[in-house]
Structures are given as structure tokens and as C-alpha cells.
């Protein structure tokens, strides 16, 4: 077919779609723009099928944002695997500002975008750098970012944008993302405000049909509207593709209307109707990266294509008039590329490879060479592998995985092919894509040979299971890997055993194929000769293993040395490994709250500096438990809330109320507690035995607060029998209390006997105070009083205010039963005031009832304004109270300074204060100036 200039006449105005209907969508866009103009921020995600009008809504937003700075980005399918490529294009106008970023953020962005040779940073730190950079730009002029076809964003760019979007608050910055529904990877934006764009209503669809140059019979119009579902692009293109006889009702319509296929075929027919040179140029454009016009024209030159070849495509409405190298609609680009002959596609990629700069575009050149090649070719594979290393150096792990997978396709040697697939699987895991990692491992399949390769495979499969919090099979998988590896690599063997121990401790009794005892014994067998050079991290794992395999008497001394070494040492090591979980087990097993607080504070700081959000999330949960034991429930909730934010950002499935078991128990929120306990029961099959025991421990605390001692005894007994490092010791005084109250002297004595052995070995104030309390509960007369007083005094020397208040309550109850009302009031009043201040409702009520029995009425505290603060406001206020600047707070919380200022204004208003110096007193925090 010969191109006909008369085809121009049928080209419709591209803005028409947005002008017909779309009232709700336009309202949502308008609200977002108004918020940006008012100094706020927001993100809107438009989802829908191809041609539904998402692109037109982005154009509508651009026309409404005259006073805003508008930056547009259209993702392209051919660039999906180029890590950080889309982010680089989006931020290119602002890269001159990168030097102003805080050092860790600047280094992360420099590495990600290849601006400097640096070690790769955590990908979430890249997201924070993106947010900070865009916020700085928006401070000069309100900014609107429009991202089209976001389903084709490379994973790293999508994660950075999603991270930034979730933290938009008060930055004069708007983000509208158009994404095709039903495609993988779009879930990254699910947490944002999502608006589903559907077909036009019948009346509006018919109005749109009337814009055509040919008459459409009303009955035919009805059929077209129903058959297209009101899809605007389908309406117009279908009306253009059908014959005049079909539109007038003389000839029958296809039944059913093949809308999707027909649209693609329609665009392909229109391209084939153009001059051959124009068709070739369109295919080159479809294969070329967006925003690289110079490269594309160099390739066009090597193919002998004239720049004038674009004119027929512009006239036919295939390319845009404003940017003659941009397709009018993303569907057209896809149709051009998919409809081309494979040989022609390879010819285009060969031309693009030749046009790539040999220094600046090495990675693109390798990719285009691969797309231009067939069969096996080790030179192509080697170039792709080299490109994968450069991607890794930038932290572009999904791009690294893609290059390695393609390299494997061109590799003839089975062993080398397998090695590249294993490396691709590891890169997928680093990017957080466990499903893709398993696919790469499956492809390696039967070609995996030798113990080292098999060990790598098993370790990666175990890691992918942990990603999905499926723990039960992991210890056995890692033990199998150890067995296969043999004596070849002692350090790798140790790492595998530590990972197996970690998983087995979490699974605690719910493992398949091995047991916690077997894993612990294997760790002990390997780590026989500890010395002064042994890192604290290794000693910690050894101590936990000895505690399980050989008993507390052998484990506690090693744990004490490990914690001391960690406290006096420098770096913690790998920030991507959640050391805080093991630290918590060691500290709880030694009742060492001081080491726990110090180490988790340092770990949190290190995690924040590195942008290691997964490790930080685990550290936050441990910090929350430390806050609970010290009676700082509102601070604990702040930690839990930040964990939930991070879990949402990272896609980690462990968020929600399941982590608040102890908070619910101590605050008396029974319905929420029991719902969370039911959730833990649902996770039993996936191997979360420790979580079940923590739930039992929380239920023990709750039932004791309610005075239901028999139920408390049942829950405590389950923890006592299992004896996990995480709460096996903490449950001992609770079991003694419950046993004494129900008359189970044997059970109480058994718990006390264990406490008598372990507390002196731990030799910490919390341990010795707990031992004194256990002795007091089982003693009589003057000896009991001496032990109670000792417990209260010793527990008051460390940050365990909750435990001290419980000791006071039990002491006061004992005194009242001996008719010493005056002495009882002293202890009970202190206990009541502490519990009431903490928010420990059931324990406060228990103390209040006891006080009434002594003849004293306890006055209920009035609610204070500090409890009106949201968790984020409380967190910002607390950090400000400690003396941090807004910029320092922003860095720690992965938000912008504008957002910190927004929260600070709300803190001032809610607390009725006018100065940062007033914050500590208003929220009940210590004043750093006074401490100094």
C-alpha cells in the first residue's frame, strides 16, 4: 500500500479524550493540583486498560498546572531491565543539585545513576535521595511529575518513586502515575491513592464517536459502545478501522468486536500504509531508548534513513507533532515493535548498538548487541556479564539479574551457563524479587553440579523462603547445604550454620527435617575455640547455640562476653542482616536491658545511615520491646508505627498488629490482643513457633493484669516448657506469681529453681531484681519483705520501670494481706501512679482496687494533650526534644525537612507551646539541657 497524504484528514485532536466526561478523574487531578499549590503534596495513581484515557488525563493535568513546573516521563518496555534508567531520565534536569544532598544520600544517588564510582547503597536510600532532591526543586517552584506507562519502569526506578511518593506530605510536590492494570510490578504503587479509570458512560461515548468524519448509524453506535466498553481509544480507532458500510449498518460488524487485537492490527496496518523508509524509521524508534534522539539519528544514518522520513508518520497521527520522535500513544509503539519481522528487529538493534558511545553507553551497547544476535555467542555473553557487574556496582540488582539471564541464553558451556543463572538468582534476591530468583534457580536445574554450586542453590532457596516468612523448611535446607559443602570453605560453613540457627530459633519446634537442638549442636561443634579475635556477632550466635545445645550454664557466659564485645567494638558488620533479633534474644536471656537499649540504639543509627530499611525494621521491633519494659508505651507505639511504614515500603509481609502482642496485653486491649493471637496461630504452619510462644507470654501478662491466675498459669507453663531464649526467662516470675496464687506450689518451686540457677549466671540488675521477686513470692514473714524491698530497689537501677511497678504492686498486695495498710498504700500508690502513667490499664485497675481495700481512693488521671499526638508527631516531637534539628530528624525518618516542619507545627499547636525548649516537659520526655 502507498501512503496517502489525505489520511491526515482523519486525524482527530489528541486532547479530545480528556474533554469528554471524566468528571471524577478530573476532580481528583484538580484536588491534587490544589494541594500542591497550597504547599502540600500528594500522589495519584491512575490505573486502567490500554486506551482508556490515562495518557489524556496526564495531558489534562499538565494543562491545568500552568504555574507549576511540570516534568514528564514515559516508561518504555524495551528499557524495563535498565536499572535506574527511568529515574535517571526523570532527574536529569536536576542533577546539578545533587551536590547539595546530605552525604549518604548523595553517595547513594551518585552510585545508582553512575555519576561516580562508589559502592552500591541500599536502594531505599536512593529513594530518600530522590525525595530530598525533588523536594529541594519544589521549594523553588511547585513541581508536578507525570509518569506514563509506569508498568514498564525498571524495578529500581519504580521502587525509588514509590518510596518517595509514600513520603510526600508538605513539599509542594505532586506525582501522577498512569499504569496499565493487571501487569506485574504495579503493586509497588498500591499503597498510594489509586483511581481506576473505566470506560466512558454510554452518552459520553456516543458524543466521542460523533467527532469522526463519517456518519455512524445509532444502532451501530450502540454496538460499538457496548463492544468497546466505552474505551475512548478503541471507540475512535474502531470507528476509523471499520468500513463505511459497517458504520452505516449495511454490512455486519465483526462479532464479537476484537477490540484489543483489532487496535493493534489497526495501528500495524496504518504503519504498513506509510512509505517503507518511514516504516523502518518507526521500527528504529520503537527499539531505541527514550530521550536518546542523538543515538537514534546516528543509527538512522547507518541505515541510510533521512530525517524527512518522520513527516508521513506525523501527518498520519502515528508520531506527535510537538516531538516528532515520540509516538502519539504508547500502544502504537508496542504495535510497531511486536508486528515487525524478527530479522528486521535484529537489524535495528544492530544499528543502535553501532550508534552507542563505546564509553558512555557500554551497557546499552551490550544489550542491543544481544537483541541483534541469535544462537550462542560467548562474546555477547561476556559483554552482558561485564555490563551486569557495572549494574551491580550501582546497586541496580534487577538490571544485573536481567543481563546475567540474557548472558546465560548466549552461553554454550553448561557449567558457565549455570554459574550465570545462579548469579542472576542472587541478584534477584538482592533486588527483593524472590519469585524471579526461584525461576532462575529452576532454569539452572539439572545443570547444577558440584557441592559449591549446590550449596549456593540451597542457600538462595532458603533465603527466598525467609523473604516470604516461610521458616519451617529453611533450617533443614541450610543444614543440607552445609553437608554438601563439606570442609571446603570453613567461613561459608559458619555463615550457613548461623543462618540455620537464626531460622531454627525463629521456628522453635516448628521445623521440618531437622530440629533446633540439631542445628545448635552443629554450630557448637564448629565453633569450639573462641578467642579474643572472635567477632561479637559470631560469639552471640555461639552463645545462643550453646544455650540450646548444652544448657544455660554453658551459654550464658558466652552470651555475656558477646554482648560486652559488641558494646565495646566498632562496626556491627553487614547492615542487611537483622542482627537486632539475635541481640534481643541474647539480652532477654540475660535480663540485660542496658545492653539491649545501647546496642539497638547503635544498630538503629547504623541502619538509618546505611538506609538499610529491612534491618532497621527489625531493630525497631526490638526497641519497642525495650520501651515497653521501661513503661514508655507511647514511644513503643511510635516504633511499631515506623515499622509498619517500612513494611509497607519494602513489601515485607510481617507488619500489622501481630507485632503489638505485648502492647495490647499491657494496655488491656483484649479484642485486639486475641485477634493478633489468632493471626499467630494461622502462621503456625509456616514455622513461626517462637511467635506462638511470644503470644503465650503476652497472654500471661494480660491474664495476670486481669487477676485470672489459672489462665495465666496455663499460658506461662507453655513458655516454661519450651524455654526459648526470647522469653523463656522473662516468663519465670510470671509463672511463680500465677502458681502461688492458684496454689501450685510445685510449679512455682520449679520455676524458682530455674531462676535461682540462671539469675546469678546472668548477674544483671534485672536478673537479680527478678530473682529477689521470685524469692519474695514464695517466702514468708520478714524474709519475704526483705526480698520484696530488694526487688523494688534493684529494679529501679535499670530502665525496667514496668517491672519495678509490678514488684511494687506485688509488695503492696503482700503488705495489705498482712494488715499493714499504711505501708501497703506507699507501694500501691507508687505502682498505681506508674501503671496509670504508662497506660497499663489492667495493672492500674488492679492497683486501684488494692488501694481501695486499704481505705485510700485513687484519683484517675485526666487525659493529657500529648496523647492526642499521632505516632509520627510523637516521634518528631521526641526527636526535637532530644535536641535534633529538623534536617537531622528528616534524615533519620526518611522524610523531608518540609514534612518535619509540618509535623512540628501540629505538635506545637496540639501541645499549646511556642518553643522547642518546652517540648520535653509537654510530652513527658527528659530535658537534654537539664541533663547536661
Image (spheres, rainbow, N blue to C red):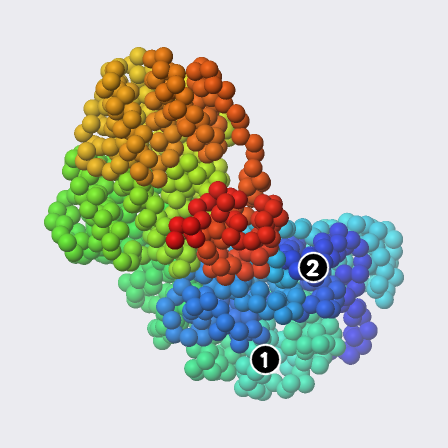
Q: Residue at x 50, y 29 (%)?
A: 669
Label 1 to label 2, Cα distance in Å? 37 Å
Look at the picture and state if 587 lies above or below 716.
below
* Residues marked 1 and 2 touching at CB (< 8 Å): no
Look at the picture and state if 349 lies above or below 891.
below
Residue 489 visible to an observer of this rendering: yes
Q: Tell me which numbered mark, 1 or 2, is placed earlier along the sequence.
A: 2
Relative horizontal placement of residue 59, taking residue 747 as reference (left or right): right
Which marked residue is nearer to the observer: mark 1 or mark 2? Answer: 2
Relative horizontal placement of residue 544, taking residue 121 as reference (left or right): left
Q: Residue at x 53, y 76 (%)?
A: 96
Dot 1 surroundings within 10 Å: few (below 14), some, or many (20 or more)? some
Look at the picture and state if 896 lies above or below 380.
above
Image x and y of residue 137, in percent: 59, 69
Residue 751 visible to an observer of this rendering: no
Q: Residue furthest front?
A: 822
Image x and y of residue 721, in percent: 27, 26
Q: Which residue is mark 2?
A: 38
Q: Residue at x 69, y 70 (%)?
A: 328
Most foreground residue, 188 or 182 = 188
Image x and y of residue 393, in percent: 38, 69
Q: Residue at x 16, y 56 (%)?
A: 533
Image x and y of residue 843, in percent: 44, 25
How many marks on residues? 2
**Quadrant into which the N terminus falls:** bottom right
Most foreground residue, 526 or 607 = 607
Q: Which residue is mark 1?
A: 293
Q: Secondary structure at mark 1?
A: helix
Most foreground residue, 670 or 469 = 670
Amino acid at each position: 500500500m502507498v501512503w496517502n497524504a489525505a489520511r491526515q484528514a482523519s486525524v482527530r485532536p489528541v486532547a479530545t479524550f480528556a474533554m469528554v466526561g471524566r468528571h471524577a478523574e478530573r476532580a481528583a487531578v484538580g484536588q491534587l493540583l490544589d494541594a500542591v499549590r497550597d504547599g502540600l503534596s500528594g500522589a495519584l495513581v491512575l490505573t486502567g486498560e490500554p486506551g482508556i484515557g490515562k495518557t489524556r488525563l496526564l495531558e489534562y493535568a499538565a494543562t491545568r498546572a500552568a504555574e507549576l513546573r511540570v516534568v514528564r516521563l514515559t516508561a518504555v518496555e524495551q528499557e524495563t531491565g535498565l536499572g535506574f534508567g527511568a529515574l535517571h531520565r526523570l532527574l536529569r534536569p536536576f542533577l546539578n543539585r545533587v551536590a547539595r544532598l546530605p552525604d549518604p544520600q548523595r553517595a547513594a544517588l551518585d552510585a545508582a545513576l553512575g555519576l561516580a564510582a562508589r559502592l552500591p547503597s541500599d536502594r531505599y536510600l536512593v529513594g530518600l535521595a530522590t525525595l530530598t532532591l525533588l523536594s529541594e526543586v519544589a521549594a523553588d517552584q511547585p513541581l508536578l511529575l507525570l509518569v506514563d506507562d509506569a508498568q514498564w519502569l525498571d524495578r529500581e526506578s519504580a521502587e525509588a518513586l514509590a518510596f518517595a511518593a509514600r513520603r510526600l506530605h508538605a513539599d509542594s510536590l505532586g506525582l501522577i502515575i498512569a499504569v496499565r492494570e493487571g501487569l506485574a510490578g504495579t503493586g509497588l504503587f498500591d499503597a498510594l491513592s489509586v483511581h481506576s479509570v473505566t470506560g466512558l458512560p454510554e452518552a459520553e461515548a456516543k458524543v466521542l464517536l460523533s467527532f469522526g468524519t463519517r456518519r455512524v448509524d445509532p444502532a451501530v453506535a450502540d454496538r460499538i459502545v457496548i463492544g468497546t466498553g466505552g474505551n475512548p481509544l478503541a471507540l475512535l480507532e474502531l470507528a476509523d478501522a471499520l468500513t463505511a458500510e459497517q458504520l452505516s449498518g449495511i454490512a455486519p460488524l465483526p462479532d464479537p468486536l476484537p477490540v484489543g487485537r483489532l487496535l493493534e492490527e489497526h495501528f500495524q496496518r496504518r504503519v504498513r500504509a506509510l512509505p517503507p523508509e518511514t516504516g523502518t524509521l518507526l521500527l528504529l524508534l520503537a527499539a531505541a531508548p527514550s530521550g536518546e534522539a542523538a543515538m537514534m539519528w546516528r543509527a538512522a544514518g547507518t541505515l541510510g534513513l533521512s530525517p524527512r522520513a518522520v513527516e508521513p508518520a506525523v501527518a498520519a497521527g502515528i508520531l506527535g507533532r510537538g516531538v516528532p520522535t515520540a509516538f502519539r500513544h504508547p500502544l502504537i509503539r508496542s504495535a510497531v515493535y511486536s508486528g515487525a519481522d524478527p530479522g528486521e528487529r535484529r537489524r535495528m538493534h544492530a544499528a543502535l548498538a553501532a550508534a552507542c558511545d563505546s564509553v558512555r553507553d557500554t551497557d546499552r551497547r551490550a544489550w542491543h548487541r544481544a537483541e541483534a544476535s541469535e544462537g550462542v555467542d560467548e562474546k555477547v555473553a561476556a559483554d552482558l556479564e561485564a555490563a551486569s557487574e557495572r549494574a551491580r556496582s550501582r546497586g541496580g540488582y534487577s538490571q544485573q539479574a536481567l543481563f546475567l539471564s540474557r548472558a546465560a541464553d548466549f552461553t554454550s558451556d553448561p557449567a558457565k551457563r549455570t554459574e550465570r543463572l545462579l548469579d542472576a538468582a542472587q541478584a534477584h534476591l538482592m533486588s527483593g524479587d524472590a519469585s524471579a530468583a526461584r525461576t532462575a534457580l529452576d532454569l539452572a536445574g539439572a545443570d547444577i553440579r558440584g557441592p559449591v554450586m549446590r550449596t549456593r542453590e540451597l542457600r538462595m532457596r532458603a533465603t527466598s523462603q525467609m523473604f516470604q516468612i516461610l521458616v519451617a523448611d529453611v533450617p533443614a535446607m541450610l543444614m543440607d547445604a552445609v553437608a554438601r559443602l563439606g570442609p571446603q570453605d570453613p567461613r561459608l560453613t559458619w555463615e550457613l550454620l548461623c543462618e540455620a540457627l537464626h531460622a531454627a530459633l525463629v521456628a522453635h519446634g516448628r521445623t521440618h527435617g531437622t530440629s533446633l537442638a540439631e542445628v545448635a549442636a552443629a554450630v557448637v561443634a564448629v565453633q569450639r575455640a573462641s578467642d579474643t579475635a572472635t567477632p561479637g556477632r559470631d560469639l552471640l550466635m555461639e552463645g545462643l547455640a550453646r544455650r540450646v545445645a548444652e544448657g544455660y550454664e554453658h551459654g550464658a557466659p558466652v552470651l555475656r562476653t558477646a554482648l560486652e564485645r559488641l558494646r565495646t567494638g566498632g562496626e556491627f558488620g553487614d547492615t542487611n542482616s537483622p542482627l537486632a533479633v539475635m541481640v534481643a534474644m541474647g539480652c532477654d536471656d540475660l535480663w540485660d536491658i542496658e545492653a539491649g537499649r545501647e546496642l539497638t540504639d547503635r544498630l538503629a543509627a547504623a541502619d538509618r545511615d546505611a538506609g538499610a530499611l529491612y534491618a532497621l525494621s527489625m531493630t525497631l521491633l526490638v526497641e519497642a520491646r525495650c520501651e515497653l519494659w521501661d513503661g514508655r508505651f507511647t514511644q513503643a507505639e511510635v516504633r511499631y508505627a515506623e515499622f509498619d511504614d517500612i513494611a509497607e515500603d519494602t513489601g515485607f509481609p510481617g507488619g500489622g498488629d501481630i507485632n503489638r502482642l505485648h502492647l495490647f496485653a499491657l494496655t488491656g486491649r483484649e479484642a485486639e490482643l486475641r485477634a493478633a493471637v489468632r493471626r499467630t496461630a494461622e502462621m503456625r504452619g509456616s514455622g513461626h513457633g517462637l511467635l506462638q510462644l511470644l503470644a503465650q507470654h503476652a497472654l500471661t501478662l494480660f491474664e495476670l493484669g486481669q487477676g485470672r491466675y489459672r489462665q495465666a498459669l496455663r499460658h506461662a507453663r507453655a513458655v516454661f516448657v519450651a524455654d526459648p531464649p526470647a522469653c523463656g526467662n522473662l516468663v519465670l516470675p510470671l509463672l511463680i506469681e500465677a502458681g502461688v496464687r492458684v496454689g501450685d506450689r510445685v510449679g512455682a518451686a520449679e520455676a524458682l529453681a530455674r531462676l535461682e540457677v540462671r539469675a546469678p549466671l546472668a548477674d544483671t540488675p534485672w536478673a537479680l531484681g527478678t530473682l529477689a521477686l521470685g524469692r519474695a513470692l514464695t517466702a514468708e514473714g520478714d524474709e519475704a519483705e526483705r526480698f520484696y524491698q530488694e526487688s523494688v530497689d534493684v529494679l529501679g537501677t535499670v530502665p525496667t520501670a514496668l517491672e519495678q511497678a509490678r514488684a511494687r504492686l506485688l509488695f503492696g498486695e503482700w503488705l495489705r494481706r498482712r494488715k499493714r495498710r499504711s505501708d501497703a498504700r506507699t507501694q500501691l500508690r507508687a505502682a498505681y501512679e506508674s501503671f496509670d502513667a504508662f497506660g497499663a490499664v489492667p495493672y492500674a485497675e488492679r492497683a486501684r482496687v488494692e488501694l481501695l481495700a486499704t481505705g485510700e481512693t485513687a484519683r484517675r488521671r485526666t487525659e493529657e494533650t500529648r496523647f492526642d499526638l499521632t505516632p509520627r508527631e510523637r516521634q518528631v516531637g521526641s526527636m526535637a526534644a532530644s535536641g535534633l534539628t529538623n534536617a537531622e530528624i528528616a534524615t533519620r525518618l526518611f522524610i523531608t525537612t518540609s514534612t518535619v516542619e509540618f509535623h512540628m507545627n501540629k505538635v506545637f499547636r496540639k501541645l499549646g507551646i511556642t518553643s522547642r525548649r518546652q517540648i520535653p516537659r509537654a510530652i513527658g520526655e527528659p530535658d537534654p539541657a537539664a541533663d547536661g
